[in-house]
Amino acid sequence: MILSIESSCDDSSIAITEIATKKVLYHKKISQEEQHSCYGGVVPELASRLHAVALPEILKETKPYFGKLKAIAVTNQPGLGVTLLEGIAMAKTLSVLLDIPLIPVHHLKGHIYSLFIEKEPILPLLVLLISGGHTQVIRVESFEHMEILATSMDDSVGESFDKCAKMMGLGYPGGPLIEALALKGYVNHFELPIPLRNSPLIAFSLSGLKNAVRLQAEALGGIEGMSEQDRADLSASFQKAVKLHLIQKSKKIFAKEEIKDFAIVGGASANRYLRNAYQDLCDEFGKTLHVAPLEYCSDNAAMIGRYAVEAYERKLFIDPNAIDIVSTKKQQSGMLL
Ligand code: KG4
Ligand code: ZN
């Protein structure tokens, strides 16, 4: 079995995965959404202190598995430095104490492997990763070969939901709140710009749209002046603009890529409105859409464990004394490191 730890942002999570069957034997996640909600986003130092309490609490429950563990896996990049360190400190300690190998896991690869929890990998695969930190299209040829085909030049999809929710005084995380409110709003009520609509670039950009939402919110009198219906209409109009943007750029990629399997992963892949739009797009292009179960869309240790099973079989271990957070600049293109 492998014990995996995830603490790259505001979710403290630990999972136990059986290597032979790839089954998740234990999985727990303690989210900090409530504690960050009043700030409208994640406060790194607060998140780090909360991990320091939550991770040991969860770890206690996994003690019965300790005798059967073959490796410890932990997210070491990308993420918030101070929160990654909490998981890494725990993983290092366990690896040394139990004298078993340590596996460093790239968080985005973990999101990709959320699709294969308790399953065999479906490869090659074209993946749209939409999370709080990233918006990327990645061509996944194999475990070793993952190439970034398109990236957001500024905000990520999840981040744009969070920031727009903040402007409307909705709380954090904004994605599920906006999605729910949008059901009560009119998608064509506000005319918002579709990012990079006339640009040939195969890239994403969400900051201009976010700014348009800010101006609209201000015109409606800001958080104090807006009515419930204004919030619903603005949510629906914003979500529609995000959808049109993602679909327009994805179409360009679909026209060039022959891979038949397509997947959406990351926190924002839980959004049903976006999922439905991608189902229609896949139908149009003869592709098969894959999504992870809802509980594994946002950050979790089960996806880290699933990736770690593959890494374990390839003996991709790291010396516990050498592991550290990897602080890379957001990767815009090339092979996923
Ligand atoms: O993957 P994730 O848990 O963390 C990162 O790796 O960043 O993604 C969190 C993000 C947040 O920005 C949250 O607002 C967004 O995913 N999200 C959604 C939905 N559920 C979560 N965005 C749009 N619609 C949703 N239903
Ligand atoms: Zn994530």
Image: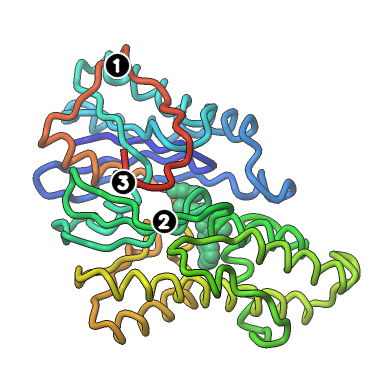
User: What is the three-letter code of the residue carrying label 1?
Assistant: Pro
Report the residue marked by disc 1.
320
Element at label 3: helix
Q: Foreground residue, 189 or 292?
A: 189
Q: Are marks 3 and 1 in contact (CB under 8 Å)?
A: no
Q: Are marks 1 and 2 in contact (CB under 8 Å)?
A: no
User: What is the three-letter code of the residue carrying label 3?
Assistant: Lys
Badge 3 crowding class, 10 Å Cα cut-off, few under 14, some 14 to 19, many 20 or more, is many
Q: Residue at x 42, y 29 (%)?
A: 87
User: What is the three-letter code of the residue carrying label 2?
Assistant: Gln
Report the residue marked by disc 2.
136
**Distance CA(mark 1)–CA(mark 2):** 31 Å
- Residue 70 horizontal/vertical position (percent): 16, 29
Specify the quadrant that holds the C terminus.
Answer: top left
**On the image, which quarter does residue 18 sit in?**
top left
Q: Name the mark on residue 268.
A: none
Q: Residue at x 38, y 31 (%)?
A: 76
- Residue 27 horizontal/vertical position (percent): 34, 46
Q: Earlier in the sequence, mark 1 or mark 2?
A: 2
Q: Foreground residue, 75 or 57?
A: 75
Q: Nearer the viewer, mark 3 or mark 1?
A: 3
Element at label 2: strand
Q: Earlier in the sequence, mark 3 or mark 1?
A: 3
**On the image, which quarter does residue 157 sit in?**
bottom right
Q: Name the mark on residue 109.
A: 3
Q: Residue at x 32, y 34 (%)?
A: 62
Badge 1 crowding class, 10 Å Cα cut-off, few under 14, some 14 to 19, many 20 or more, is many
- Residue 227 horizontal/vertical position (percent): 84, 77
